[in-house]
Amino acid sequence: MSNDKPDSATNPAAKLWGGRFSEATDAFVERFTASVTFDQRMALEDIQGSLAHAQMLSEVGVLSGDEYHQIADGLKEIAAEIEAGNFPWSVQLEDVHMNIEARLTERIGATGKKLHTGRSRNDQVATDIRLWLRGRIDLIGAELTRLQTGLVDLAEREADTIMPGFTHLQSAQPVTFGHHLLAWNAMLSRDFERLMDCRKRVNRSPLGAAALAGTSYPIDRARTAELLGFDAPTENSLDSVSDRDFAIEFCAFAALLLTHLSRASEELVLWTSSQFDFIDLPDRFCTGSSIMPQKKNPDVPELVRGKTGRVNGHLIALLTLMKSQPLAYNKDNQEDKEPLFDAADTALDCLRAFADMVPALKAKKENMLAAAAKGFSTATDLADYLVRKGIAFRDAHEIVGQSVSFAIEQQKDLAELSLEQLQQFSTDIGEDVFEVLTLEGSVAARNHIGGTAPDQVRSACARARAQIEERH
C-alpha cells in the first residue's frame, strides 16, 4: 500500500532503529523480514497495550500529564483509522508496532517518540499476542459452550432413541442416540477445561520485561497488568520475551478439539450415507455433485475432518520453532503468529459450523432401531442373564457363542429364536430370557451413572446442563 513515509531502501535512517546502520536494508531482505502483512491483525491489541503503558508512565512521572494525553488521543485516532480501513500500512516499517509508532509521531510530533520509553518490541509483541489470544480464547469458549448446549438439548430429545453401539465399527451392543451424543459432549467438556486452564497461563503480562533484562526506568508492571486485565506480571524478564509455550499450549488444545470434532465428523459422514442412513443433515449444511444429480454431500463435517490436519500441523510447527532457541528473543519467533492465528481461526470456524449444525440433526429412528436389531447386539445380555442363573461367565460366553452360530445358520436374530431352540444350548434359559433379548430391555438394564439407560441419559443431560450454566 502506498504511503508518504520515507523509503528505507534508500535511507537507513528512516528506520526507527536505523541510527547504527550505514547502509539501507536490501529490498528483498526488507520484504523477507517484514511481518506487517500478518501481524497487523493485532493492531488494536497493540494500541491497547500502548495506552496502558503510557498511562503507567504518566503515573510514575516518566511522562507529563500533557504528554500522556497527547499520546492517548493520538492512539485513539489511529485506532479509528484502523477500524475504518484507512490506515497506511507500510512494509518498510516492518511490523504493526513500528507502523503505529511512526504514525503516532507523524500525528503528534516528538512526543510520540517517548511512548517506547521503558519497553522493547520484544515485550510489546509478547503482550500483543497474549491480548489477542485471550480474546480468541473467550470467543472459542463461547462457541464451545453453544455447541455443548445444542448437543445436550439434542441428547435429551433422543434419550429413548435406540441405535447400535459399535466397537471396531462392528455392531456390539444397543445404546441410545442420546447416550452417544453425550459421549461427544464429554470430550468437549474436557476440551473446555483445557481451554480455560490454558487461559490462566496466557493471562500474564510480559509488558515491562523490555528487551530481555527489564528496564532502569521506574515502571510499575503490576499497574500495566491491572490496566490490561491480566492476572499478574510474568516473573522473569528473559522468559517473558522469549517463550511461546502459551501459544503452543493453545495449539495443543486446538489439535485435541479438532481431533474430537473430526471423530464426530467421521460418524456424521457415515450416518448420512445410504449404507447407514441414520440421520438427515439439512440441505444448508450440504452440497451437491457437478455430475451426479442425486448426490447430497456432507461437506461441512468432511471439511472439519480435513481441517484437523492443518491444526495438527500448526502445533508441530510451533514446537519445532521453539525447540532450539537460546534465551532470550530470536527473530525465529516472528514465525509464531501465522500458525497461531490460523489455528485459532480454524478452531473458531469449525466450532461455529458444528454449533449451527448439531441442533438441526434429524434422527431416523426407525433405521437406527432396525440396525440395532442386526448383528446380535443383545448377545452380551444373554450371557449376563446366564451368569445371573449361576453359570460362570466363561461358560456363559461359550453358550451364547453357540447360540449365535445357530442363529446365523437359521438367518435369525437371537430374539427370533424359540425357547426350545435356545434351551438346546442351556436348560437354564427360561421364558424370561426374552425380556433381556429385546433392545429396549438391553438399554434399560444399563441403569447406572454413565450407562445408556434412558433415565440415566436424562439425568446425565441435567448434570451436563448444570455444568455448562456454571460457566456464566
Image (cartoon, rainbow, N blue to C red):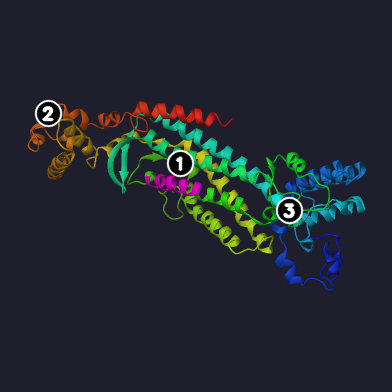
Label 3: few (<14), some or many (≥20) within 10 Å?
A: many
* The disc label shown at residue 187, or none: 1
Q: Is residue 296 visible?
A: no
Q: CA distance from mark 3 to mark 1?
A: 36 Å
Q: Which residue does the image show at 52% across and 38% down from the upper left?
A: 356
Q: CA distance from mark 1 to mark 2?
A: 41 Å
* Majority secondary structure in the magenta region: helix
Q: Is residue 190 visible?
A: yes
Residue 268 counted in the magenta span: yes
On-image quarter of the N terminus: bottom right
Check disc 1 and report its element: helix, strand or loop: helix
On-image quarter of the C terminus: top right
In the rendered structure, which amino acid carries the disc numbered 2? Gly
Label 1: few (<14), some or many (≥20) within 10 Å?
A: some
Start-end of magenta stretch? 256-270
In the rendered structure, which amino acid carries the disc numbered 3? Asp
Residue annotated with mark 3: 123
| Above/below status of 323 relative to 461 | below
Residue 387 picture quarter = top left
User: In this view of the protein, which residue sits in the foreground, 326 or 68?
Assistant: 326
User: In this view of the protein, which residue sits in the foreground, 338 or 256?
Assistant: 256
Picture coordinates of residue 24 (x, y %)? 82, 71
Picture coordinates of residue 60 (x, y %)? 85, 43
